[in-house]
Image (cartoon, rainbow, N blue to C red):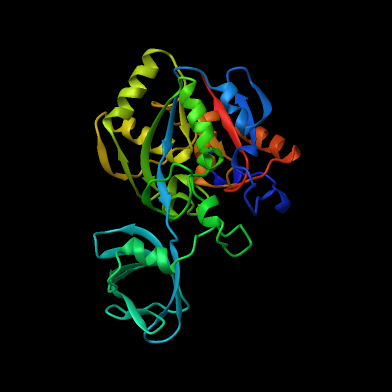
Amino acid sequence: MTTLISSYDYQLPTDSIAANPLDHRSDSKLLHYNLKKSSYTDQKFSKLLNILKKGDLLIMNNTRVIPARINLNKDSGGRIEILFNRKINQDSIEVIFFSSRKPIINSYLVLDGEKFFKVLDINKNYLTLLKLSKDNIFGIFEKYGEIPLPKYIKRLPIDSDKEKYQTVYAEHDGSVAAPTAGLHFTQDMINKILDAGVIIKYLTLHISYNTFKPIIVEDFLNHDIGEEYIKIEEEVFSAIKIAKKNESRIIAVGTTVARALEFCYTKNIKDSYEGPVDIFIYPGYEFKAINCLLTNFHLPKSSLLLLVCAFGGKKNIIDAYNYAVKNKYRFYSYGDSMFLENL
């Protein structure tokens, strides 16, 4: 198996990148790929209802995207952009910063003449900030931040992104990006899925920049995957145990769910867990928790593409991506999805 990231590439025309969401979430396309039968079919996402059956287990990530990007000024002069990375405690956060010059420790970040944050620490392109505002941390971002659309979406965020770039089941604040496989679900679809006897469970993985951090080393084994925060209840593991016993489909809705579950199973965690997840999944990995994956189409040479190739096989996935390009699927966060079935 090659570990050269340059071999995990495919050609994507720029007009295949979805710059805007569809008016109706479930109108997106779904490529249903049965890996056992080596066949795929083109579907509308709403037809997932016809694919699922009683006893299937869907596991979703109920994290909520916050308006995680804020433009401020340094008290020494000059602009600085911060991107939320993680909450340290009630009063301090870690952010990624973008500025022509680094701020100084013990300096202040200012907005409209008001001191919002004090710089406590600087580590590479990360800042530790102490909030000075009376608002709570997420309240500050809700008031002054903007939805951090991925850089490949070449437009400014608009008000509708606050709703569209959010799953209908989002609950817990903390992500800088949506778990995009879940963006296609409507509440009506979820209700019908439950009525059909499909079991739905939720976990929380707060998506940080680490999920999308470019792999800049040729040998991806040297890539630092970083950490993210997860919270998962024992009932999720119980549901998986029952599904395995019944030989049912265990469907991770998104790569974040796959990473969270596989981390727990790799560490033999079968009870409630709250803490960091740092698993790096690439071809050669043997999946222990899931047997199906619902996922969007990911960037070339990315850790997310490596995970999908690990699940479906590199050649299978690259061939499917090329098929999707040829058949006008929409790619990336606001794009279409694929259902990888391996049972």
As drawn, is 62 to the left or to the right of 295? left
Name the residue located 61 percent from the left edge and 33 percent from the top edge: 45
Where does residue 148 sit, x and y in percent of width and height? 50, 60
212 and 249: which one is in front? 249
As drawn, is 331 to the left or to the right of 294? right
145 and 222: which one is in front? 145
Considering every residue shown, the one lying at the far bottom of the view is 76
337 and 214: which one is in front? 337
Residue 3 in view in this figure = no
Name the residue located 56 percent from the left edge and 57 percent from the top edge: 160
As drawn, is 224 to the left or to the right of 299? left
Dividing the picture into quadrants, the one containing residue 41 is: top right
Where does residue 236 sit, x and y in percent of width and height? 33, 29
As displayed, is residue 70 above or below residue 220? below
Name the residue located 55 percent from the left edge and 61 percent from the top edge: 159
27 and 339: which one is in front? 27
As displayed, is residue 118 above or below residue 200? below
Residue 324 in view in this figure = yes
